[in-house]
Each structure stands twice: as structure tokens, then as C-alpha cells.
């Protein structure tokens, strides 16, 4: 049986308040395992806050956030963040490293064996539509 990529992510009526200011108001959506989700909206509408609540960089005021049916609030935040990731809006790549080296940064810090790192780099590149053979040695500035 093939291993599926990713996990189902579900937000149920998630709200974040800062005092009287509502940053995110009862947000609900489901992203099925293996699917890509993009949050689009004007500046200040709560996109970054919503994503930061998924990995618990910000705690929700109310609602539930589930990953494969498990409430993220039950997880140790550090362990949770090791299992998930997201693309940030600011530049998040090291310009002096290749695409493959950028992707391999966290697995390398976790002490993964080189073979496992290479397999994961190839898997993630294919997941986002990049041919590992053609793109792994390119630098971020060479991507369009």
C-alpha cells in the first residue's frame, strides 16, 4: 500500500481575539490529506494568524484545530511543529543554498541519514511539481 502524503487539516469555528480586536472570526475549513491549500486575502485579514494557530505559534481563543482528527492543543507544540510546515509570505529560503539544500535543512538538523534526506527532498520536490533531477541544484533566484 502506498504511503499517503500529508494529513487532513481541519479548522472548526476557530477564533482569535486580541483584547476587543477579532483577528480571525469563526474560521472553518478542511484540507484533505495530500491536497495543497492556499489562503488568499487582503493584508490584515488573518491569513498568517490562522496558519500560526495551526502550528501553535499563536494559541486560538476558541474553536478546534485538528490534524488527522487529533486536536493540536493535545500535542506538545515542539513535536507538532516537527511534523508540519507551511510556506511563509516573506522570503524563507537561504539564497546561498540550492533548492535541495534548503529543503534538507530541517532533516539535517534532526540528524536524519543522508539517504533519508535525499529521498524526502525528492518526494517534496515532486509534491510541488518540481523535477528533482532538473531543479535540485538550482538556487532560489533561479526559480521563477
Image (cartoon, rainbow, N blue to C red):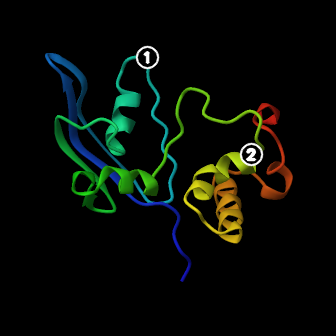
User: Looking at the picture, does residue 36 appear above or below residue 79?
Assistant: above
Quarter occupied by the N terminus: bottom right
Q: Is residue 49 left or right of residue 70?
A: right
Q: Is residue 28 left or right of residue 39?
A: left
In the rendered structure, which disc, 2 or 1, sits on the residue that comes first in sequence?
1
Q: Is residue 141 left or right of residue 47?
A: right
**What crowding class fits label 2: few (fewer than 14 Cα within 10 Å), some (14-19), or many (20 or more)?**
many
Q: Which residue is mark 1?
A: 43
Q: Indicate the position of residue 66 as horizontal and vertical percent values.
A: 28, 54
Quarter occupied by the C terminus: top right
Residue under the point 24% across and 38% down = 59
User: Looking at the picture, does residue 26 appear above or below residue 77?
Assistant: above
Residue under the point 50% across and 43% down = 86
Q: Indicate the position of residue 73 as horizontal and vertical percent values.
A: 23, 51
Residue under the point 83% across and 43% down = 138
Q: Nearer the viewer, residue 109 or 6?
A: 109
Q: Which residue is mark 2?
A: 99
For marks 2 and 1, give the CA distance.
Answer: 28 Å
Q: For residue 74, what is the image quadrant?
A: bottom left
Amino acid at each position: 500500500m502506498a504511503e499517503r502524503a500529508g494529513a487532513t487539516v481541519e479548522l472548526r469555528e476557530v477564533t482569535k481575539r486580541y483584547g476587543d480586536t477579532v483577528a480571525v472570526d469563526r474560521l472553518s475549513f478542511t484540507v484533505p490529506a495530500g491536497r495543497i491549500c492556499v489562503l488568499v486575502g487582503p493584508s490584515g485579514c488573518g491569513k498568517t494568524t490562522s496558519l500560526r494557530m495551526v502550528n501553535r505559534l499563536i494559541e486560538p481563543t476558541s474553536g478546534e484545530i485538528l490534524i488527522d482528527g487529533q486536536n493540536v492543543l493535545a500535542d506538545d507544540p515542539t513535536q507538532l511543529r516537527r511534523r508540519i510546515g507551511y510556506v511563509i509570505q516573506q522570503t524563507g529560503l537561504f539564497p546561498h543554498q540550492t533548492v535541495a539544500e534548503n529543503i534538507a535543512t530541517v532533516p539535517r538538523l534532526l540528524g536524519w541519514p543522508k539517504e533519508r534526506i535525499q529521498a524526502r527532498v525528492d518526494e517534496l520536490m515532486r509534491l510541488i511539481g518540481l523535477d528533482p533531477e532538473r531543479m535540485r541544484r538550482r538556487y532560489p533566484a533561479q526559480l521563477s
